[in-house]
Amino acid sequence: MRTPSLQVLHLLAQRLDVTGDYLATGGAGSTAEDDVLTQAEFALRFDDLQQAEKLFKDVLESAEDSRSRARALDGLGQLAFRKGDPRTTVERLEAALEAYGGDVGAHARLADTLGRAYAMLGDLGASVEIFDRCLAEARRRGDRLEASRFAMLLGHALIDAADFDEAQTLLEETTALASDVTDPLLHARLYWLESRLYAEQNDAERAARYARKALSIVEMTEDRAYVGRAHQLLAHIEVDRGRPADALDILERGRPLIAEASPVEQAQYRLEEARALASLGESERAASLAMEVSGVIAGANVEDAGRSYTLLAELFASFGDSARAHELYELAAELLERNPNRYLVRVYRRHAELLESEGRPQEAMDLLKKAVAIGEFEQPRLRLPRRKAMLPS
């Protein structure tokens, strides 16, 4: 039997957030707290969230060293993310990172979740910085798999930041790297990334084509949550293409796949259903559903919350309740102005139409000027430094 090298053990230890001694000996150097943390991590992986939370908190209250404290905070941060609470996720993972020593590139799982949580809160600068640093670290180690992972996370963050040129460059690099990789999920994620890139640039036809390619691959896997998200992406694109009935069919097929997802993920899924219903003229059903999901999404994802308020504003305007519509348009704009995107353009334009219909042309013109100023994303939303971290050859 071959014995793994110290370098391999070190890399594995980093991935698992345990000591090299523990991997080498099966327990040398471990403590009672290590055993409890291991139990907590297993409970988290197997969706026993209540037990995981209890064990992580027990260790946090009695931790005698910084590493045990870091692992407990890390676990509680992962738990908060699973529950759809990005603010608590950031607080706990930042505290964990400080206890670990502050090197985000050395803790891939933490970095993955922390970057996603910042993006959900609308802090795209922090998200991009984390993923970029982790990509650079993976490249330095020559870790092609980890580099691919963080390249795609960075790609999504760059798309969110409307830095489409940089996202396109990164996509091309990652596609070249993946040509020698047989992992089908890697290729599905690349199609997903390409689909989002086209969708955000209003090329719905190509976005749908790549989304279907991604879906055809992930449907062959056992990752139900991932397949469910692929259905959601494709339904979103079909609504944008003016095919709401097709979107509803896609969502119905994918509904069983999200039965065990977090409340926030289920609300995001149902938001696409509300959009499709509104496009079909089923305003009352759409409004009821949008109100239901907006309360769940509000504190978890800035962009989705803005989209749900926009949909509600449009529906209340169609019902003749202009006071509620104005209030909701303003709320949606306040959220979406943190990271201007095509949804904010829609808010300005629809709100301007309502103001115009009420004989308020100057206010309508002011909003239309704001919409034009966004300029169809000719400039990125963030002033990001030019990336130097390229993928390992």
Image (tube, grey):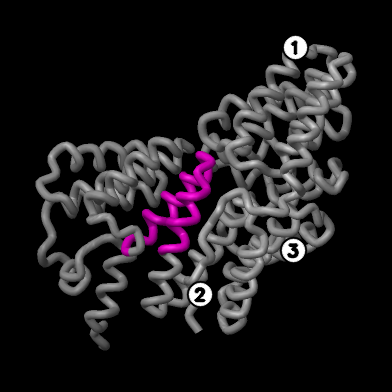
Mark 3 lies on a secondary structure that is helix
Give the number of the disc on residue 210. 3
Return the disc, 1 or 2, that comes first in the chain's sequence: 1
* Magenta run includes residue 53: no
Residue type at mark 3: give it: Tyr
Mark 1 lies on a secondary structure that is helix
Point out the stretch of residues depicted in magenta. 106-133
- Name the image quarter holding residue 31: bottom left
Residue 259 image offset from top left, x and y in percent? 58, 41
Q: Mark 2 = which residue? A: 390
- Name the image quarter holding residue 279: top right
Residue 160 image offset from top left, x and y in percent? 61, 50
Front label number (2 vs 3): 2
* Magenta run includes residue 119: yes
Front label number (3 vs 1): 1
Residue 126 image offset from top left, x and y in percent? 45, 50
Question: Distance between the Cα atoms at labels 3 and 1?
Answer: 41 Å
Q: Which residue: 75% across, 61% down?
A: 212
Residue type at mark 1: give it: Ala
Q: Which residue: 47% across, 45% down?
A: 118
Q: Residues within 10 Å of mark 1 (few under 14, many from 20)?
A: few
Question: Distance between the Cα atoms at labels 2 and 3?
Answer: 24 Å
- Which of 251/333 is in front? 333
Drawn side of residue 160 relative to residue 349, left or right: left
Q: Mark 1 = which residue? A: 323
Residue type at mark 2: give it: Met
